[in-house]
Amino acid sequence: MQSSIKSVGTYVPDGVLTNFDLEKMVETSDTWIRERTGIKERRIAAPTQTTTDLAVAAAQSALGAAGLRPEDTDLIVLGTSTPDSFFPSGASLVQQQLGAHGPAFDVQAACTGFLYAISIADRFVSSGQARQALVIGAETLTKIINFKDRGTCVVFGDGAGAVVLGPAVNGGGIKSCVLHSDGSGGDLIYVAPGEPGPEGRGHAEIRMDGRKVFRFATQILAEVTLEALAKAGVPLESVRLIVPHQANARIIEAAAKKLGVAPGVMANNIAWYGNTSSASIPLALKDAVVDNRLQPGDHLVLVGFGSGLTWGACVIEWEGAPAGGA
Ligand code: COA
């Protein structure tokens, strides 16, 4: 049995932080940010809004789009690097708020979190251990940003995305997943103690060697896409859509070039959300579904990388799935 995406749902906070807002906070400019990253604005959670709040809203959108009730699911896997607390897990909190049942746990693989989560849930569903799984990526990264560090504060944003995973019906669904980790790159992007900032933001902060991460990312996105396609036995030419982790528009463009695919094959909505870590792939997938970029029978690749270093990709034969949410 193979597992398949039954619906996609998203939630982003109402608060918008534009490049012009950032111009007032650090020495940067709208032009620099747009040209170097492709980002125009990002969402920012309210001080009282938690990662769990975002995850619950995204899960409800995915359930609503599929016409399912929370009790129709029996597994929750949440990819996040910004859980509300060390424990209980974010997934347990989501389960309680939804009124769902079954095992629930978090996966911490930084920006590769959604790929790790969907890959694990795929094993549960395809082995029959779960009937229908909620797979969520949710982050409130702006709570671990130093808004005085222009190398990081222009890049990241908050958001959440979710899919319901269930048994494939037409022989489609997830054809392969590959995951990797190399801890020797752990010092390229990490979280360190930070100065307490306004509204409780900044107790911990992301530190990043942007240039080195950039080089790694452009190489690995193409490599792991080809690895997952080879494992699935799907030729690159038959891929309709590649949904990469949204870290930088130039990384996405460079990966398209390396693969030799048209830029239009790559999903790219980074202008509106920035890098939302484990939420970025489901957020971009949702926009692609809403824009009618996928038809049943199409092949797509979800591919990402992140701190760890971690990276991975999944190849999917799209069976058609509704999308919902903000
Ligand atoms: N505004 C204006 N200038 C900035 C700036 C900002 N926000 N950030 C850096 N600069 C300056 C630098 O100080 C540097 O100035 P200098 O040439 O006088 O020394 C110049 O711009 C170039 O800096 P550099 O760090 O080489 O920029 P870049 O083109 O690599 O862009 C990132 C920086 C962070 C946008 C880019 O490296 C990146 O996206 N890296 C990947 C990060 C990533 O994917 N992280 C997530 C992993 S999941």
Image (spheres, rainbow, N blue to C red):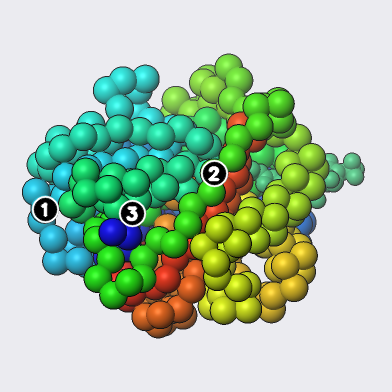
Drawn side of residue 101 relative to residue 293, left or right: left
- Label 3 vs 1, first from the N-terminus: 1
Residue 162 numbered tag:
3
Q: Quadrant of ligand 1?
A: top right
How dense is the environment of label 1, judged by Cα within 10 Å: few (below 14), some, or many (20 and up)? Answer: some
In the image, what residue occupies the spot 60% across and 73% down? Answer: 235
In the image, what residue occupies the spot 38% across and 43% down? Answer: 120
Label 2 and label 1: CA atoms lie apart by 28 Å
Above-or-below relation of 249 to 136: below
Q: Are marks 2 and 1 in contact (CB under 8 Å)?
A: no
In the image, what residue occupies the spot 37% across and 20% down? Answer: 86
Quarter of the rendering containing residue 306:
top right
How dense is the environment of label 2, judged by Cα within 10 Å: few (below 14), some, or many (20 and up)? Answer: some
How many numbered marks appear?
Answer: 3
Above-or-below relation of 148 to 245: above
- Label 2 vs 1, first from the N-terminus: 1
Residue type, label 2:
Leu
SS for tag 3? strand
Judging by the rendered image, the residue that carries numbered circle 2 is: 179
In front: label 3 or label 1: 1
Above-or-below relation of 191 to 91: above
Q: Nearer the viewer, residue 121 or 279?
A: 121
